[in-house]
Image (cartoon, rainbow, N blue to C red):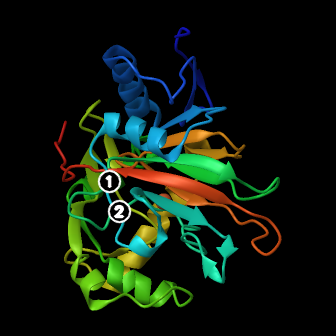
């Protein structure tokens, strides 16, 4: 295997990885370097990856056990570990999740054990638009005023999937009672410690966060909007313009991401995503 190398994609977010073919077996030492780099940079990019769904799953499993998504109707047939994100309609049906994710979030943050990370393989994408924008929530946290950081360190945020889905996704099928039962509201520390490098990060998003515990929905939404307006400034952000064959991994423990708009009527975008299981967020004060 060629020598592994990293190059920065932006000041605070993202490293491009050279010298790795994700379709080949990977040594533990290479894997360890990727895990450390991902924790520090939030995002890893591998270009030119011509890999099968099975190879994507095999590589993803090296990072941890995989989730099967609550929206099982959008999983790849025969591969429940792969969640399809696409605007494509085949035989009158959407082949993947569509119309969502245009607001900043980290995947499965509404679970008691949110996803550790997500691996995205680009199969088709428009020539313009459809980028993915990713924010380093550790860089944003570091740059907040001290008073705000101290307040946030004492907060727990309530993530409520059903509350959000019912007001935002009128274009998607209604959730079944069984699906609702699987995603009750959950509270997480608003600042979490990264288990690999120990850095604190904001753990908030534009979706699902209903309130800070003990604060009204209305007041919570005002505070949340103010914090996220600060966090999503360009200096904490990397915007990835996709090319087919790109594999992008993002760390859901210290970043949020969203898809940018594109011409959904006249162009095709198709991505395969695996979602790595995570552990319960915690915060360890370093003060
Ligand atoms: Fe996502």
**Residue 265 visible, this orientation:** yes
Image quarter hosting the C terminus: top left
Across and down, in percent, residue 64 comes to 28, 40
Across and down, in percent, residue 183 comes to 26, 76
Position of 242 with respect to 211 (left or right) is right
Q: Which of these two is toward me, 146 or 252?
A: 252
Assess whether mark 2 and mark 1 are in contact (beta carbons under 8 angstroms): yes
Please give the name of the residue rendered at 23% of the width and 37% of the height, measured from the top-left corner: 195
| Secondary-structure class at tag 1 | loop
| Secondary-structure class at tag 2 | loop
The residue under label 1 is 115
Across and down, in percent, residue 224 comes to 41, 69
Q: Which of these two is toward me, 187 or 176?
A: 176
Position of 164 with respect to 284 (left or right) is right
Mark 2 Cβ and ligand 1 under 8 Å apart: no
**Residue 256 visible, this orientation:** no
The residue under label 2 is 108
Across and down, in percent, residue 193 comes to 25, 42
Please give the name of the residue rendered at 27% of the width and 32% of the height, measured from the top-left corner: 196
């Amino acid at each position: 295997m060629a020598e592994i190398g990293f190059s920065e994609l932006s000041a605070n977010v993202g490293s491009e990885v050279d010298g790795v073919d994700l379709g080949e077996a990977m040594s533990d030492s290479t894997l360890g370097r990727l895990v450390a780099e991902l924790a520090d940079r939030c995002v890893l990019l591998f270009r030119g990856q011509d890999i099968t769904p099975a190879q994507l799953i095999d590589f993803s499993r090296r990072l941890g056990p995989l989730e099967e998504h609550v929206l099982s109707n959008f999983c790849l047939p025969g591969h429940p570990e792969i969640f399809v994100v696409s605007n494509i309609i085949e035989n009158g049906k959407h082949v993947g999740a569509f119309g969502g994710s245009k607001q900043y979030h980290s995947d499965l943050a509404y679970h008691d054990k949110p996803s550790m990370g997500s691996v995205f393989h680009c199969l088709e994408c428009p020539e313009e638009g459809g980028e993915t924008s990713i924010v380093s929530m550790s860089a944003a946290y570091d740059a907040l005023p001290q008073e705000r950081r101290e307040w946030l360190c004492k907060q727990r945020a309530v993530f409520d999937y059903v509350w959000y889905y019912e007001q935002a996704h009128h274009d998607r099928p209604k959730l079944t009672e069984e699906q609702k039962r699987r995603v009750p509201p959950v509270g997480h520390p608003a600042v979490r410690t990264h288990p690999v490098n120990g850095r604190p990060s904001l753990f908030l998003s534009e979706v699902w966060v209903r309130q800070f515990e003990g604060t009204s929905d209305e007041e919570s939404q005002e505070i949340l909007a103010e914090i996220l307006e600060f966090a999503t400034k360009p200096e904490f952000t990397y915007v990835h313009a996709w090319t087919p064959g790109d594999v992008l991994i993002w760390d859901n423990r210290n970043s949020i991401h969203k898809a940018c708009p594109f011409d959904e009527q006249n162009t095709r975008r198709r991505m395969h995503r695996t979602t790595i299981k995570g552990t319960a967020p915690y915060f360890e004060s370093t003060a």
